[in-house]
Image: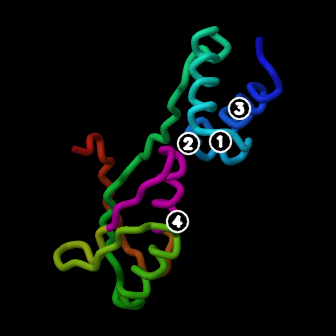
Amino acid sequence: MMDATDERILAILKADGRKAFVDIAKELNLTEGAIRARVHKLVSDKTIERFTIDTREDVKAIVMVATSRSVPTSDIARQIKELGVEHVYEVSGNYDIFCLVASDSINNTNSIIETIRKLEGVEDTSTTIVLKND
């Protein structure tokens, strides 16, 4: 049989399944051991059937960018960083910039790449999708 404290524990865990027992204990003015025992009981009596882990699957792409001489490469690199791209490198060779674009879906990744392609001074891009990350 659940009481009001058990219901509060469930509500907290539903909102944040990763919340530490010690933090729940502080919030409810109980000991960590009391919270642990109550959660164990809720699992034992099948009130809590399972704990799940939701992960965000990142889609990553390596984008190589060729720039024109009309806009400084450093300006284009800065604009790419302003799009939220964390890894942007000015390089030598056939392309002037290499960057690692990552987001939570292929559509969002593609949207960032399309925005890069539309930047003034971008002449060409070549994109490779990352299939495996070791």
Please report contact status of discs 1 and 2: CB closer than 8 Å, yes or no: yes
User: Residue 55: within the magenta?
Assistant: no
Amino acid type, mark 3:
Ile
Q: Nearer the viewer, mark 4 or mark 3?
A: 3
Measure the alpha-carbon separation of dots 3 and 1. 7 Å
Judging by the rendered image, the residue that carries numbered circle 3 is 9
**Where is mark 1, residue-wise?**
24
Vertical order, 125 against 14 (above or below): below
- The earlier-in-sequence mark between 3 and 1 is 3
Three-letter amino acid code of the residue under disc 1: Ile
Q: Work out how far the residue at label 1 is from the one at label 4, CA to CA, in angstroms.
A: 44 Å
Tag 4: amino acid: Thr
Viewer-closest of 2 and 130: 2
Location of residue 87 (image quadrant): bottom left
Residue carrying label 4: 115
Q: CA distance from mark 4 to mark 3?
A: 45 Å
Ranked by sequence position, the earlier of labels 4 and 2 is 2
Q: Label 2: which residue? A: 20
Secondary element at image label 1: helix
What is the spatial separation of the Cα atoms under label 4 and label 2, in whole angstroms? 41 Å
- Under circle 2, the secondary element is loop
